Image (spheres, rainbow, N blue to C red):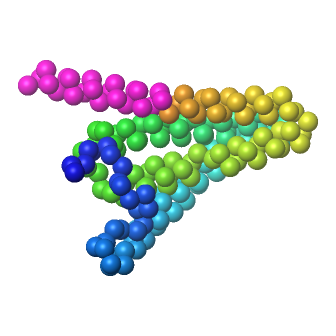
């Protein structure tokens, strides 16, 4: 069965590689290692943004909000580029960039902590606005990133087609 360029691997676990029946699968640690390396880079970037944009107790956590929204926009861009427009990138690029860097940059665990802190600080209204605004903005950002990237790559291909 031919595989499409943007089709996911039939093996849901990229660490275990399928082997012949009766032969033990080969375990590969390169995927978790590149995810960890990318995650470390993303987490350092996220931390840097919280240092540059601190928020007061009970105040809207803008650093976390914009980090998550920007990260989701980049997830939309990168995933389209890697699955639809980059030919056949190395198999470790998507785990490194998508899961690692952008997964480490976006911080939905901090998002939930921020919501709890806002409620504890006596600002449940701000917590609700933050909770729903982050979710909505993140989902919109992924879609915008995907649509913009598809449009840009289509326009680029169309421009190249008219030049020849």
Q: Is residue 53 magenta?
A: no
Instruction: Compare residues 97 and 18 and report the one nearer the observer.
Output: 18
| Identity of the residue drawn at 39% across and 71% down | 28
Residue 97: give x, y in percent of width and height: 44, 51
In the image, is 120 to the left or to the right of 51?
right
Q: Is residue 37 visible?
A: no
Where 57 falls versus 100 (above or below)?
A: above
Magenta stretch prevailing secondary structure: helix
Q: Is residue 33 visible?
A: yes
**Total numbered labels placed on residues in the image:** 0
Instruction: Compare residues 26 and 145 and report the one nearer the observer.
Output: 26
In the image, is 146 to the left or to the right of 134?
left
| Identity of the residue drawn at 45% across and 31% down | 145
| Identity of the residue drawn at 20% across and 23% down | 158
Q: Quadrant of residue 63?
A: top right
Which span of residues is magenta-colored? 143-164
Q: Quadrant of residue 21?
A: bottom left
Quadrant where the C terminus sits is top left
Q: Is residue 158 magenta?
A: yes
Residue 64: give x, y in percent of width and height: 67, 41
């Amino acid at each position: 069965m031919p595989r499409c360029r943007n089709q996911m691997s039939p093996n849901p676990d990229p660490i275990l590689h399928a082997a012949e029946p009766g032969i033990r699968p080969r375990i590969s640690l390169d995927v978790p290692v590149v995810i960890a390396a990318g995650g470390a880079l993303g987490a350092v970037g996220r931390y840097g943004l919280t240092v540059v944009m601190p928020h007061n107790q009970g105040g809207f956590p803008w650093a976390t909000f914009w980090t998550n929204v920007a990260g989701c926009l980049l997830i939309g861009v990168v995933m389209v580029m890697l699955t639809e427009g980059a030919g056949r990138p190395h198999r470790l690029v998507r785990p490194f960039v998508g899961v690692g860097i952008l997964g480490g940059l976006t911080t939905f665990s901090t998002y939930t902590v921020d919501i709890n802190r806002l409620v504890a600080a006596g600002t449940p209204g701000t917590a609700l606005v933050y909770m729903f605004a982050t979710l909505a903005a993140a989902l919109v950002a992924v879609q915008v990133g995907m649509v913009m990237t598809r449009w840009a790559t289509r326009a680029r291909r169309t421009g190249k087609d008219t030049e020849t």
